[in-house]
Image (cartoon, helix red, strand yellow):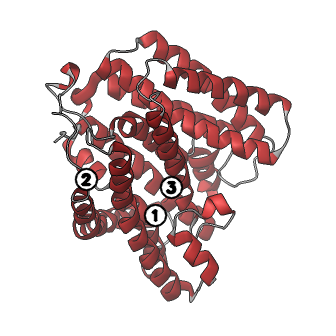
Amino acid sequence: MHKRLAFIDTLRGIAVLAVLLQHALEAIVQNHPTGAYYWLFHDAIGYYMNFGRFGVVLFFFVSGFVIPFSFPQTEHPVRDFVVSRFFRLYPAYWTSILIGLLTMLLVESKVYPTSQLITNITMMQTFVNVPNLWIFYWTLAIELLFYAGCTILFAMGLLDRRLTAVAIVVSAALVGTAAAILIENRTVSSLMEVGLNLSAMFLGKIIRDTVVGGKLRWIHVAASTAVYAVFAMALSERRFGGVYQENFFYSYGIASAYICAALVFIAFAAFGERMAWRPMAFVGVISYSVYLMSPFVIVLLHRFFWAGDGPLGWMAFLGVILALSIPVSWVTFSMIEKPSISFGHKFRSGRRRPAVLEPALSTQGAAE
């Protein structure tokens, strides 16, 4: 059994708290008079840095560091991988849908079309052009695409090849940058944004292959990160540039999010467990539940608890969100997420050969 890497969980904790901060501050700015602080808020979470996108991209890097190495050494590794991912994602996701439906019915008396609800239950809504029930579900489609890509590469014997991830990141960056510069089309920009998100994931694998496997060198990380950064800047300018319209999405803020996420991840990976912080790592362990549940905590608190406008009221609102989101998410993690993962292990096939730890991991363990 692999051990968890505490610095990876620390990164997960940072990522989900960044997303939570973005959502909470957006609720304040969009629904309450902020007076002289209005543009200060917008500059902090939109114009110069979108912390929500930063957190999401940091999650993508973590997935790239972990998922390609999650195919078990069993008789049926692809089937076992799919089963483990299903039980990892879907039960907690379905719980989030149920809590979301109850929350929106209570707060806004809102109901959703049956067809939209059924499609969202499959987690495939993005692929059939059906709206997400809630916007933050968009990241799950990227995760599923990455899982599918890793599965195909694994089945073809390419996933563990030395330069596969480098080739993917460089190719995506060249094509995406050219498309962003030469093609003014929103559909193309949206597709390139998917490519940028997947590039972040494969860049995470490149970093893993450098700091853990030793198959790559830091020159590969530097070159891949450089072209990824250019891709992020070019695409952000095309997709989110122009006149800033108070919508929290602007070229500076989005590009900064992608680049800062890469730099933070590289720094943590370079120093490894020395970057671990146990309280944040705990948040990281339950981060999927925090991501899925905290938006509804924000909605409920905004509806039934509001400490008043002004800095003190806003700080109280943020503090209560944090104070409630963590225990609520711990409950869903303990009662839904963790038991589901354990239950999924029962469906694994037998081992094909004895597991051998990579030498570089012998003292710190592999990430789950």
Which quadrant of the structure image shows residue 342? Answer: bottom left
- Residue 32 visible, this orientation: no
| Earlier sequence position, callout 2 versus callout 3 | 3
Q: Position of residue 171 (x, y in %)?
A: 64, 24
Q: Secondary structure at mark 1?
A: helix
Give the left or right position of residue 126, taking residue 259 as reference: right
Measured in 3D between alpha carbons, the distance from the residue under mark 2 to the one under mark 3, in whole angstroms, is 24 Å
| Earlier sequence position, callout 3 versus callout 1 | 3
Disc on res. 348: 2
Which quadrant of the structure image shows residue 157? Answer: top left
**Residue type highlighted by circle 1:** Trp
Q: Position of residue 183 (x, y in %)?
A: 85, 35
**Residue type highlighted by circle 2:** Arg
Residue identifier under label 1: 314
Q: Position of residue 217 (x, y in %)?
A: 40, 11
Which quadrant of the structure image shows residue 173? Answer: top right
Q: Position of residue 269 (x, y in %)?
A: 33, 26
Q: Secondary structure at mark 2?
A: loop
Between 318 and 249, the one nearer to me in the picture: 249
Q: Is residue 244 above or below residue 28?
A: above
Residue identifier under label 3: 140
Measured in 3D between alpha carbons, the distance from the residue under mark 2 to the one under mark 1, in whole angstroms, is 48 Å
Kindly identify the residue that appears in the image at 42 percent across and 29 percent down.
205
Give the left or right position of residue 69, taking residue 360 as reference: right
Measured in 3D between alpha carbons, the distance from the residue under mark 3 to the one under mark 1, in whole angstroms, is 30 Å
